[in-house]
Amino acid sequence: MAVIVCHGLKGGAGTTFVAAHLAMSLSEAGAEVTVLSVAQRDTLPLHFGLQPALTLPSLFAPAEDAVLASGINLRSYHKAVDDLDFVPTLLDLGYLETGLDRAMVIDVPASEFAFARRIIPHASANLCVLNAAPDTLALLPQVLGEASAESIARTTFAINALDETRRLSRHSSAFIRELVGPRLVGRIRLDESVPEAIAMLQPLARYAPSSAALSDVRAIGAAMVPALDTPGRPWVPRSSQAASPSRAA
């Protein structure tokens, strides 16, 4: 019953999109998956084709109140960022243990950096979502320098909304790859199908099954599956796993 944290350096990187599709990949791998949003304003349901006005039940709500999408349990607990007992609570609920049977993906807004730093050392992995943009590049060395050894040992990176028709985007992606090395699990190509699917209130897989972004994010999800076996221990993808999604991009 492992935990994977999805977090970004800045807003607008697409962390919720990646978290939702990571949950789908873990579910397809056979895990019983819960996605937990700790954001005050939640867009998680949109990536499952649900109505934007839907209010997700609390982490502590009874099973009969659950919102299930493709078998994935969607929950919300925005008070987690101020709850100093949140990690012990996860332990009491049976998470933070080894096993592919159950998993929790926690979608953490970029603004809640302190919360992310608090829970990452207890997670199986942290997937940091980046944009190949100058402001992200400016933040990345600082964040890597500030990260604790425990946090960086569990952190992998994904580049989202990569526009390979733009020279700056390509060069920025290459710089990120050079900086983080094998910790880059993949790149997700910019794809208009992603916002179109949200506008049509459909999951991306149903709206555009041949979407380039869908193929890329699925490859990243598959690369993250082995992290479920290593709660409490550092996990970094093998070079072959990290290279495969990147080649797709």
Image (tube, rainbow, N blue to C red):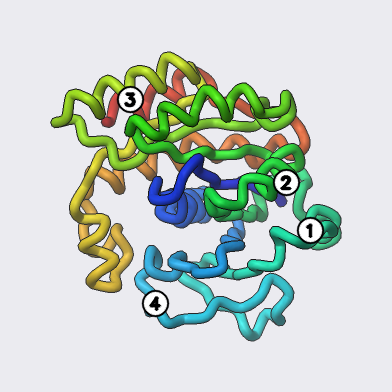
Q: Earlier in the sequence, mark 4 or mark 3?
A: 4
Residue 31 spot, x, y in % from top left: 59, 54
237 lies left or right of 91: left
Based on the displayed image, in which of its 4 quarters is residue 98 positioned? top right
Q: Earlier in the sequence, mark 1 or mark 3?
A: 1
Residue beneath disc 4:
52
Mark 1: few, some, or many residues within 10 Å (few <14, many ≥20)?
Answer: some
Q: Amino acid at mark 1?
A: Phe
Between the C-alphas of marks 4 and 1, the distance is: 27 Å
Q: Amino acid at mark 4?
A: Pro
Residue beneath disc 1:
86
Q: Say what secondary structure mark 4 lies in.
A: loop
Q: Amino acid at mark 2?
A: Ile
Q: Amino acid at mark 3?
A: Ser
Instruction: Give the quarter of the figure containing the C terminus.
Output: top left
Mark 2: few, some, or many residues within 10 Å (few <14, many ≥20)?
Answer: some
Between the C-alphas of marks 4 and 2, the distance is: 28 Å
Q: Earlier in the sequence, mark 4 or mark 1?
A: 4
30 lies left or right of 3: left
- Of residues 135 and 93, the one nearer the viewer is 135
Mark 4: few, some, or many residues within 10 Å (few <14, many ≥20)?
Answer: some
Residue 58 spot, x, y in % from top left: 66, 75
- Of residues 236 and 85, the one nearer the viewer is 85
Q: What's the residue at 62%, 84% (across, down)?
A: 65
Q: Does residue 30 appear in the picture of this structure?
A: no
Between the C-alphas of marks 4 and 3, the distance is: 32 Å
Asked whether the beta carbons under mark 2 and mark 1 sit within 8 Å of each other, the answer is: yes
